[in-house]
Image (tube, grey):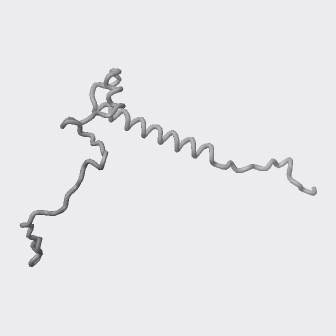
């Protein structure tokens, strides 16, 4: 490989080799077909939704609702309420 005038010439065979047998990385592609996520399969098989697109929409909606509920609960139960002193307990010398 040579670089001349901002051009790359790859005329020679590369000596870099890669041994794929050392890695056990699983791809989502199995024999050329995409693998459907398990949760999507369950939603379609139980006839909760009609297709994969509806299943993904349902799961995203559930995530958004759960995030909103979590924020609501967190802000309501962690806020410190201000104490309002009773006028009867004031220390007036009158």
Image quadrant holding the C terminus, namely bottom right
Picture quadrant of residue 37: top left
30 or 52: which is nearer to us?
30
In this rendering, is residue 3 above or below 60? Answer: below
Is 17 left or right of 89, judged from the image as shown? left
- x, y percent for residue 30: 23, 36
The image quarter in which residue 16 lies: bottom left
Q: Where is residue 32 shown, x and y percent of the image?
A: 18, 37
Q: Position of residue 93 (x, y in %)?
A: 93, 57
**Residue 51 falls in which quadrant of the image?**
top left
Horizontal and vertical percent position of residue 83 = 74, 49
Q: Is residue 62 left or right of residue 17?
A: right
Considering every residue shown, the one lying at the far left of the view is 11
Name the residue located 68 percent from the left edge and 48 percent from the top edge.
81
Q: Quadrant of the N terminus?
A: bottom left
In this picture, is 12 found above or below 76? below
User: Residue at position x 28%, y 33% from top?
Assistant: 36
Apparent side of residue 66 relative to residue 41 in the rendered image (left or right):
right
């Amino acid at each position: 490989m040579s670089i001349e005038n901002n051009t790359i010439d790859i005329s020679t065979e590369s000596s870099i080799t890669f041994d794929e047998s050392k890695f056990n990385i699983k791809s989502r592609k199995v024999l050329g077909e995409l693998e459907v996520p398990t949760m999507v399969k369950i939603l379609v098989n139980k006839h909760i939704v009609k297709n994969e697109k509806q299943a993904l929409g349902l799961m995203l909606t559930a995530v958004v609702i759960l995030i909103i509920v979590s924020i609501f609960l967190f802000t309501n139960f962690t806020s410190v309420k201000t104490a309002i002193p009773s006028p009867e307990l004031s220390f007036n010398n009158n």
